[in-house]
Amino acid sequence: MPTLATLKARWFWYSLLCVLSWGAWAMLSKLGSNEIPADTMQFIFTFGTVPVAAALLLARRFKMERSGKGIFYAVSNGVLSGIGGLAFFAAFRAGGNTAVITAASSLYPMITVALAVTILRERLTWLQVVGLGFAAVAIVIFSIST
């Protein structure tokens, strides 16, 4: 149960909005991928980001960032997100189980953790390592067909 401090933290509410949005996104991804090919889904999906980008640009009064490094990371993020989304839609289109595909692709934080440890030299506690182990075992169990 979240503590009072957690409920007051902005990150908690942003995270909750993220979970709700991505949960609905995954369901709509499956429904759309049943109707149109993955490459078309990815192309059309991009149009959904235009109103969000326009609202953000308007909120910033059309002020653009100047950090070349930050812009590089943002564009790289978009390219990798596009490739990942295409693979996600293709997995649905290939007839996979929605719950298994969504759960398996949701293990991407394990890659992030591995990169953070190796590249950023971040440290994990033993409890966090145990949690990663449980996540890996859970996806294997979850994906077993009955």
Image (tube, rainbow, N blue to C red):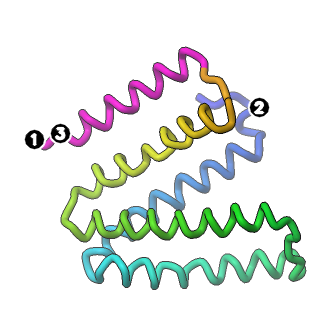
Left or right: 13 in relation to 114: right
Locate residue 53, reporting x and y percent.
70, 78
Pointers 1 and 3 in contact (C-beta within 8 Å)? yes
**Is-magenta flag for residue 53?**
no
At mark 1, the secondary structure is loop
**Is-magenta flag for residue 132?**
yes
Q: How many marks?
A: 3
> Gap in Å between the C-alphas at discs 3 and 2?
39 Å
Dot 3 crowding, Cα within 10 Å, few <14, some 14–19, many 20+: few
| Residue in view at x 60 percent, y 49 percent | 16
Q: Callout 1, which amino acid?
A: Thr
Q: Which one is nearer the viewer's eye here, 101 or 64?
A: 64
Q: Which one is nearer the viewer's eye here, 138 or 5?
A: 138
Left or right: 40 in relation to 143: right
Left or right: 79 in relation to 24: right
Q: Which residues are magenta?
A: 125-146
Q: Which mark is residue 20?
A: none
Q: Splitting the image into 4 quarters, where does residue 71 fall? A: bottom right
Locate residue 102, reporting x and y percent.
36, 53
Which residue position holds label 1?
146
Where, quadrant-wise, is the N terminus in this rendering?
top right
The nearer-to-camera label among 1 and 3 is 3
Q: Splitting the image into 4 quarters, where does residue 57 fall? A: bottom right
Q: Which one is nearer the viewer's eye here, 61 or 78?
A: 78
Which residue position holds label 3?
144
Name which of mark 3 and mark 2 comes first in the sequence.
Answer: 2
What's the magenta bit mostly, secondary-structure-wise?
A: helix
Which residue position holds label 2?
5
> Gap in Å between the C-alphas at discs 2 and 1?
42 Å
Q: Callout 2, which amino acid?
A: Ala
At mark 2, the secondary structure is helix
